[in-house]
Amino acid sequence: MYQQTDILSIARNQPLMQEEMEVLLKVNRNVPGSVNYAILRYRRQPQWNINDTGVLVYHYEKNNPGANYLELKFCVSGNVYCRQKQTECDFCKFSTSPDCVEKIDSVDVLSFSFKPGYLAQFTRNNKQSSISDEVLSFTHPDSFSRQLPLCGKTRTAIEGLLNHTYTDTLENIFVNAQTQILLLYSMECILEEKETGFICKFLANADDREKIIKAREVLLQHIGEPITIKALSRKVAINECYLKKGFKEIFGTTIFDFYQGQRMEHAKYLLYDKGLSVTEVSLMLGYSSISHFSTAFKKHTGIKPCELLLH
């Protein structure tokens, strides 16, 4: 019989009797220099006693920097998997009958692994560093793991990853955004900062914080069609000064650097996963010339676009 500790060991990648566990969904994606993530959905057994949980693992080896990584792991239950695709179901039994034969209770295990090169874009260049800055820059001297509470915001992000309907390039943009949201919330958990600690006083207002977060979503929607800060501020109904200052404080980077970083992460996906040419990706991301795109790509990743294809 599987006990609660056995389910938690899924999230910690400890050995399990995998042959007794029915896998309903398996997703695994690996892009060099970016986040590696995996989603495993298991059929839930009646005897399983499960508490939803999250774990942050910081692995640091001083004499072997190539082995350093940060990992987020989540195990959530109570979700329902439908074997029938929505497009193939004229009248969804799941929503009308508790005895629907297509309905399967599931346990979902998600893991996200980040390398130092990817996390470096989120570090702040200031003299006063917090524990999150040390972790993201891999200057914290000791490995550790910490359990993460699954708050409403974290659950919403996980739910989005499990149930979104995006495909191809839109899926990549969405998954990348949700992954960074989970990273943000996890850093908040280990910091345990209070909302009153904002430098920008207006961020104490929940509505203004939501506008800043909304601005981030709008930027992600304009990966291939650059939007000005003036237009962005109008879309989220906040003045430009507040937008720039609030964005920098919440996300630890400027609007421009964040947007460029997201474009280059999407460029890696288009080049490596989709097999598009440098010329095609340059056009899709709205660059006026291939050389401008190549320069921006190398500045963000350390390699030229054509070199990524050799990995």
Image (cartoon, grey):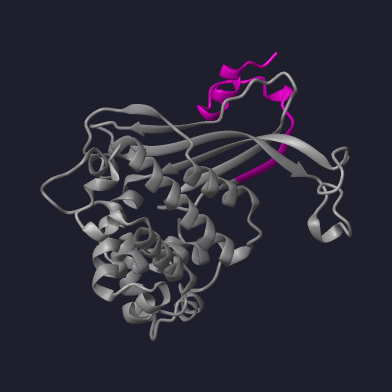
Measuring from the top left, give residue 218's x and y in whole percent. 45, 70
Q: Position of residue 31 (x, y in %)?
A: 48, 53
State the image coordinates of residue 168 (x, y, percent, origin top left): 61, 64
Residue shown at the point (72%, 24%) measured from the top left: 19
Eyeballing the image, is 68 above or below 181?
above
Q: Quadrant of the C terminus?
A: bottom left
Taking depth in this image into account, of 248 and 266 the one nearest to the observer is 248
Considering every residue shown, the one lying at the far bottom of the view is 288
Give the farthest residue toward the left.
127
Which residue is at 39% across, 86% downward? Answer: 288
Q: Which residues make up the magenta segment?
A: 1-27
Judging depth in this view, the residue of 202 and 243 nearest the camera is 202
Q: Residue at x 38, y 79 (%)?
A: 234
Spot the residue most to the top. 1
On screen, residue 296 versus residue 263, left or right, reads left
Residue 149 or residue 25, whichever sits in front = 149
The image position of residue 123, as x and y in percent, is: 25, 51
Instruction: In this rendered view, identify the residue nearer to me: 168 or 147.
Output: 147
At 55% from the left edge and 39% from the top edge, which residue is drawn? 110
Vertical relation: 43 (above or below) 33: above
Picture quadrant of residue 295: bottom left
- Quadrant containing the N terminus in the rendered view: top right
Number of callouts in the render? 0
Indicate whether residue 114 is drawn in magenta. Answer: no
Q: Per the image, is 9 magenta?
A: yes
Q: Is residue 227 left or right of residue 40?
A: left
